């Protein structure tokens, strides 16, 4: 991803909400990355405390955290996102330190953001940001989250082209007045599969650091690219029922699943010292309650497992699973710091 | 619930996984409760460190935590549950301290446990437990989790009667050889709606401390009984779209929902200093991503809300939501300790 950003001459500002780990952050620093994205003030504080000096909080600014935001803005280059005049006014009234502001743009996902075509609304909001002496308008930020509904590279391409067209048009409208304005884009599906980002100024993918079964389904990666598995202790083996119970439930995986059948909560992989292998036929966690996971196991699987073993599971949504767990270990047994 | 236990002359051993709070634990202690249930060794350690001396870990014993279990067993009366001979043997081989063992019974939920009718299997397992000099067989524990599929008190009654019949029969088989053996039961739906527990020896409901929208749907409680709401900052108000975005997503609520329509992730209540009120027509969180919640708001709702307000939401499953959050506040603004 760092190489792709370099080829396109765009800033790589990876989203760190996926891993939330100072140790994994260092791997990015080793690639020359010095700007990052997070999704909360708390995460921004954690990474600022771990040496990161240029952080974008890519979630609509929460005014109730104004004190923590101000404290953070006093010691790092902090970029906030917003789409409403009231937020801009409040920041200017209540901050003592300077922040950069990117305006959230809706390019088709329809969650937050101003419709990319609503130039008038952007003009009004930029005016409010300019009028204050704490906020500086620095550009437009979009998250094409509807790429998560894609099921092929062709579909991802359509989302990508649509976003590109809308954002370039928006930039054209304002580039004369704001020659330094930047376009920030970058969900994992488009950043993983598309090549041309030269029209943007920065990319912010996050999930790609681990990938997961959702991303395989979307078409962002192959099963072999998934780089995180949840280690779950086996607490019950029921041979006559071909059932295995693991200590791994909704409080560990989250209860996310995929619309595709069969409904499941993770896929079991086979582990040795150096790697895991994707086994066939697929073995899934088929039921999940708060702490229990239930695996419908074939004969081979159940004959090779006993209570007290650890099984390893590729998660449906690695961001959610990683958020719930406290620690990572690498293959050489090294623990990685986590927020 | 404490009064109901007293009327039935059964031990009240509330499940503390729902709140995971030492402060809320004190409210139980004030009612004369001195035995509790938890679902992990970590939680047991937390409550042991907060003065609780009699704890049941109602999750199949995880042998990988043997050291922590042994440490805990050295300082409190610890009860573990299991349903497999291998687990009993391992405990006897590896513990230096004594633990009580309750055997997990399947009364129809079909998750973990030995089928209540399989007397032979119980005999074999009890023999293994007896043979060791670290484990003492103290009784049978059941969780009628299929009561969560109920949608009326009549349906809950059927589950309750079925469990009762099976467990009483099981107890009859072993009471001569083990005159002190106990029956431990108690999901929130049955404990909330049924009156007769005199046939059991202890009840272990947990969710009732807060209740939630799931329990309303099951028939365990009324909407007015729900005692916890998640406070979510408003970060976006979109009047023309009747849309409000809150800082409250899957990482705060969990993504649990109910099979009933409309699909939603929580119901908004109206708060004043003394209480919240259930407003009509119902306002729901209709979409949830990782950090964002989206509310489809009617005109009255949207005209009375602004960025920076807090909205309060009754959760679908309070155990999951409470597990994800760090703190509680009471109406008088007092923060409650949480694990």
Image (tube, coloured by chain):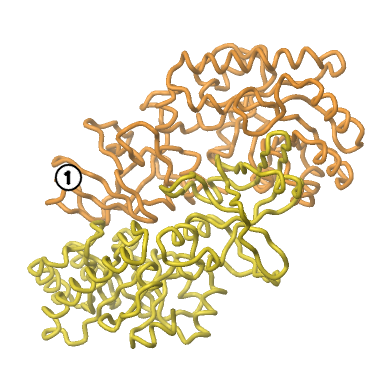
Chain colours: A orange, B yellow
Q: Residue at x 45, y 31 (%)?
A: A211
Can you say whether B277 is above or below A15 in the image?
Answer: below
Q: Secondary structure at mark 1?
A: loop
Q: What's the chain of the residue with tag 1?
A: A
Q: How many marks?
A: 1
Can you say whether A28 is above or below B45 in the image?
Answer: above
Single out the residue that lies furthest toward the front.
B281
Give the image location of residue A339, x and y in percent: 57, 49
Give the image location of residue A231, x and y in percent: 36, 46
Q: Specify few, some or many for label 1: CA neighbours under 10 Å numbering under 14, 14-19, or 20 or more.
A: few
Horizontal relation, residue A307 to residue B24: left or right: left
Quadrant of residue B332 within the rendered picture = bottom right
Horizontal relation, residue A97 to residue B137: left or right: right
Residues B214 and B277: in front is: B277
Q: Residue at x 40, y 72 (%)?
A: B192
Can you say whether A113 is above or below A195 in the image?
Answer: below
Horizontal relation, residue B130 to residue B223: left or right: left
| Screen quadrant of the N terminus of chain B | bottom left
Residues A234 and B170: in front is: B170
Residues B154 and A290: in front is: B154
Quadrant of residue B272 within the rendered picture = bottom right
Q: Residue at x 32, y 50 (%)?
A: A293
Give the image location of residue A27, x and y in percent: 55, 33
Q: Residue at x 53, y 45 (%)?
A: B250
Q: Kindly identify which residue carries mark 1.
A: A304
Quadrant of residue B76 within the rendered picture = bottom left
Can you say whether B116 is above or below B51 in the image?
Answer: above
Single out the residue that lies furthest toward the left.
B120
Give the image location of residue B132, x and y in percent: 17, 75
């Amino acid at each position: 991803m760092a190489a792709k950003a370099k080829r396109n001459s765009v800033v790589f500002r990876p989203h760190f909400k996926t891993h939330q780990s100072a140790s994994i952050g260092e791997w990015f620093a080793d690639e020359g990355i010095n700007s990052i994205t997070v999704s909360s003030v708390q995460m921004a504080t954690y990474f600022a405390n771990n040496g990161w000096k240029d952080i974008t909080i890519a979630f609509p600014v929460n005014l109730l955290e104004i004190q923590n935001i101000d404290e953070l803005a006093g010691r790092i280059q902090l970029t906030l996102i917003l789409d409403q005049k009231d937020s801009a006014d409040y920041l200017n009234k209540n901050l003592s330190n300077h922040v950069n502001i990117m305006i959230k743009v809706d390019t088709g996902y329809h969650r937050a953001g101003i419709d990319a075509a609503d130039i008038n609304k952007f003009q009004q909001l930029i005016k409010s940001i300019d009028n204050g002496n704490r906020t500086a308008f620095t550009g437009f930020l979009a998250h094409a989250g509807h790429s998560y509904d894609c099921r092929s590279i062709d579909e991802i391409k359509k989302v990508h082209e649509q976003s590109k067209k809308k954002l370039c048009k928006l930039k054209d409208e304002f580039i004369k007045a704001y020659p330094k304005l930047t376009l920030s884009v970058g969900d994992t599906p488009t950043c993983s599969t598309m090549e041309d980002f030269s029209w943007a100024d920065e990319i912010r993918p996050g999930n790609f650091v681990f990938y997961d079964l959702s991303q395989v389904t979307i078409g962002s990666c192959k099963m072999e690219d998934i780089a995180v598995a949840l280690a779950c202790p086996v607490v019950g083996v029921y041979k006559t029922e071909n059932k295995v119970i693991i200590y791994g439930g909704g409080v560990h995986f989250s209860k996310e699943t995929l619309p595709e059948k069969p409904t499941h909560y993770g896929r079991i992989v086979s582990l040795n010292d150096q790697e895991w292998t994707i086994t066939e036929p697929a073995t899934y966690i088929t039921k999940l309650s708060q702490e229990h996971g239930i695996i419908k196991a074939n004969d081979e699987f159940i004959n090779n497992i006993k209570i007290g073993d650890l099984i390893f599971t590729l998660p449906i949504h690695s961001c959610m699973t990683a958020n719930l767990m406290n620690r990572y270990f690498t293959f050489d047994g090294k623990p990685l710091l986590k927020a």
